[in-house]
Amino acid sequence: MTRLLPLSPLLIAAGILLAANGLQGTLIALRADAEGFSTSTIGFISAAYFLGFMSAAWLAPRLIARVGHIRVFAGLAASAAVGTLILVLVIDPYVWAPVRTLMGFCFSGLLTTVESWINARTPNSDRGRVLSIYRLIDLAGVTGGQFLLPLFAVQGFAIFAITAILFCLSLVPICLADRSRPKAPAEYRFNIPAIWRLSPLACIGCVAIGLTNSAVRLIGPLYAKEIGLDTAGVALFVSAGVIGGAALQFPFGWLSDRYGRRSSIMLATGGAVLAGLFLSLYARSPMEVYIGAFAFGAFALPLYSLSAAHANDRADDDSYVIVAAGLTFFFSLGAVIGPLVASVVIEHFGPPAFFTYTSLVHGSLILITLYRITRRPAVPRESRRPFVSLLRTSPAFFRLARVVKPKRAKRAKRK
């Protein structure tokens, strides 16, 4: 454990960032609704976030190469804090949309900085432990941040100030406790046609996940409020989905390693369809909604890791991060569209139709998976890479999570 202590400033900073961003995502939907923004307007503001998120995937490494990790982190953290305060000082959707684009860029860039820094300081022997700790930090940060909402009024200034304080606080361990000077990460190349040829199912899967999971994350709080949950109930709803996603990541990973990626994708997608229909058609009491949210997260959230594993089974070791960048692009593409569509669905058909929308998207993914099974044979079990649970934060996380096939590692040693 002492070997991991030098990483603690970076892990603490990541935890603070994840808590701040998780809190802000829920807060924006609730405050916009309280201010009288239309549901479709809230969807547009939510989509703007992922425009910024997408652009940072390829701009952040260039910034780090130009001025270094610490300066990029400080600049983006300060910008995120300023953006948070602008949101409460100027209550206007025409201001909120570009600010949320800035926030998406800042958050993606901040985690690209932290994750590439962690990657540079993590020896191969410790990667498994660091990944496990990082997953726990993600779970604790996102769920813990939600429960700041009931403590402070959504309509007031204080909760925005708390969020800005968290962004500023993340600077402390980075600037004062870590004196390392890692090399800048390599730029992420986007060869979209090559990634598509490598695995159409993984690309389509990431688009589908973006269409649904981004909507649940950013429009889901609005759904929860409109079905009658109070602020604490909304926090529980969001947290239940995140905890559910963590609960079945590794069971699905084990199944996919043993029985194949596409079978596991179909199983997880089928579960997400059923959970969505339960929330849409049957869940009425708060407890039923929380159970449905947990089940939806348990089946829907592992789909990104399963899709990435399916693509990487067919990728060379040298193209691992290029695949990551491509899948991040496809996810972001769906994530830009998802909140827009989901908000229109709620506005025209009511809150229960929200999870009917997610079930339709996931149902389509099942049909596409069945079609792909008929078009290409599965990767043999001995040729599959070990499953790794992934966060949709930045392509830098794929560097940290990279796994070299044993056979290729031996071949590299011989050379």
Image: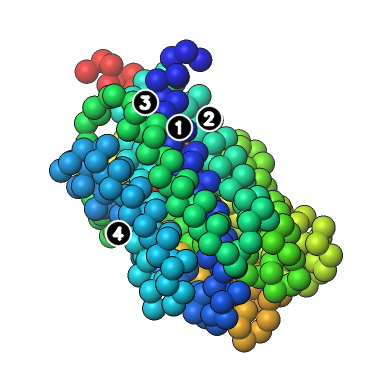
Mark 2 is on which residue type? Ile
* Pointer 3 with pointer 2, Cβ within 8 A: no
Q: Earlier in the sequence, mark 1 or mark 4?
A: 1
Residue indicated by mark 4: 55
Circle 4 SS class: helix
Residue for point 30% across, 43% down: 74
Near-viewer residue (150 or 57): 150
Q: Residues within 10 Å of mark 4 (few under 14, many from 20)?
A: some
* Pointer 2 with pointer 1, Cβ within 8 A: yes
Residue 378 in percent (x, y) is at 49, 46
Please state which of the two labelled residues, at mark 3 or mark 2, is closer to the viewer.
Answer: 3
Circle 2 SS class: helix
- Above or below for 357 versus 328: below
Distance, label 3 to label 1, CA atoms, is 12 Å
Residue indicated by mark 2: 133
| Image quadrant containing the C terminus | top left
